[in-house]
Image (cartoon, grey):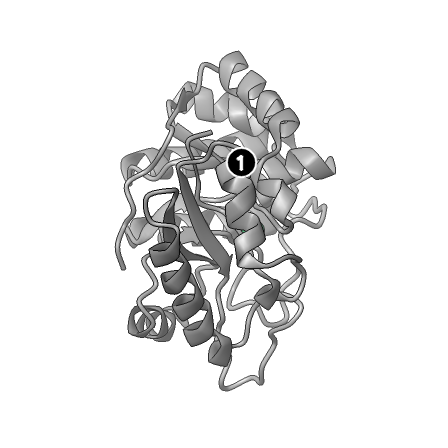
Amino acid sequence: MYANYHTHTVRCGHAVGSETEYIENAIRGGLKLLGFSDHTPYDFFDVGPRNRPIRMAPEELPDYAETLRGLADRYRGRIELRIGVEAEYYPKYFPALLDMLRANGIEYMILGQHFLGNEVDEPYCGRPTEDVRVLERYVAQSSEALQTGLFTYFAHPDLIHFVGSAEIYDRQMRRLCETAKQTQTPLEINLLGLRDGRHYPCARFWEIAGEVGNDVILGCDAHAPEDVCSPEAEARALALVEKNALHMLASVPLRRL
Ligand SMILES: [Zn+2]
Ligand SMILES: [Zn+2]
């Protein structure tokens, strides 16, 4: 791998290790670019905070950005560091989120739609469901996110765990892949899913992406320093790329906020 844009830090409450450990491992593994994209803070001001262990608190964002800016200077010439976040698209809170990210000099966002609606009272998208309405809402909300043109790429687009009709899944996911293509948003094959044996990457989803002709990129989704170098998961992801004749990118242009 040349670049990995999907790296967490301890601030989200469910990752381990220091930033320098992630960076040193990335250098050892041969990465030329490492992007940090911890779970974005969200200020659910009218419903009370719901942060850890999902995401950092808003007051932790300045330290996150400053720490990484300092490290980017320190490691200049050895590895290129980029400062991003993994963010859900919640329509109600999105404008305030952008203000907060811009004020802290965050360079990019990747879309990780872990919940629907505005998160509160909504189930995790990775929970198995036969409910067509949940699938439709995932596709509609993610599509709206892609159409903002602000997300550098779409992390684990196949996180939704629909176990109902295969025909309905195909129709909905094809629409999602087409929207990603129209908005020129690459789709991520998530190496955490492979390392952990999760329900994603979903074989059928990547067949559809191959048919639609999406651009794809690999993402480590590192929650521990050793995750930025996972050759075994990478080999399995590459097999998926080859099998479906996917168009893989080594790096992606950042969509600045
Ligand atoms: Zn995620
Ligand atoms: Zn992640």
Element under disc 1: helix
Direction from residue 70 to residue 233 in the image, left or right: right
Q: Residues within 10 Å of mark 1 (few under 14, many from 20)?
A: few
- The residue to which callout 1 is attached is 28
On the rendered image, what quadrant is the C terminus found in? Answer: bottom left
Is residue 38 in view from this perspective? yes
Looking at the picture, does residue 193 appear above or below residue 94? above
Residue name at image x 59 percent, y 44 percent: 159
Identify whether 67 is placed above or below 176: below
Q: Position of residue 189 (x, y in %)?
A: 52, 33
Q: Residue at x 64, y 42 (%)?
A: 226
Residue 195 image-quadrant placement: top right
Residue 36, placed above or below residue 177: below
Residue 92 placement, left or right of 190: left
16 or 221: which is nearer to us? 16
Q: Residue at x 72, y 46 (%)?
A: 128
